[in-house]
Image (spheres, rainbow, N blue to C red):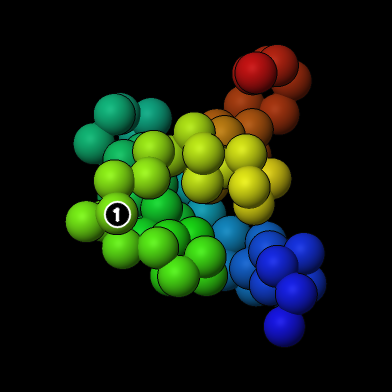
Amino acid sequence: MKLKFKIKTFESTIIPVLTYGSQTWETTEYQMKKPQVTQNSMLRNILGVRIEDKLSLEKIYSKTKAKRVSCVAFSRKYPKKNIA
């Protein structure tokens, strides 16, 4: 499958599962880190990259152009605030 299709499928199925109930979470660093670590692992898997390959997260996100789950969760909790 093409990377674009994999990412679109990921964002439409996995991101909602990871952010389910995010409106009720405390917005602590610990609470936001857990789903973010899961997403990073899944994106590495989609790209076929291992942690030992030492590919930075910035490069992974620039290749996939995926939305960060922590930003999605934050925007669901605070819909009127803008985050970059």
Specify the quadrant of the image occupied by residue 38: bottom left
How far across and down, in percent of the image, does residue 14 sit? 57, 68
Find the residue positioned furthest to the bottom.
1
Say whether residue 72 is visible: no
How far across and down, in percent of the image, does residue 24 sit? 45, 44
The residue at the point 72 percent across, 83 percent down is 1
Amino acid beneath label 1: Asp
Task: Name the one closer to the observer, 71 or 37.
Answer: 37
Find the residue positioned furthest to the front.
53
Task: Name the one closer to the observer, 36 or 81.
Answer: 36
Query: Is 23 drawn above or below residue 80 in the view shown?
Result: below
Left or right side of 37 for 78: right
The residue at the point 70 percent across, 67 percent down is 3
The residue at the point 63 percent across, 68 percent down is 10
Say whether residue 39 is visible: yes
Left or right side of 47 for 49: left
How far across and down, in percent of the image, does residue 75 sit? 64, 33
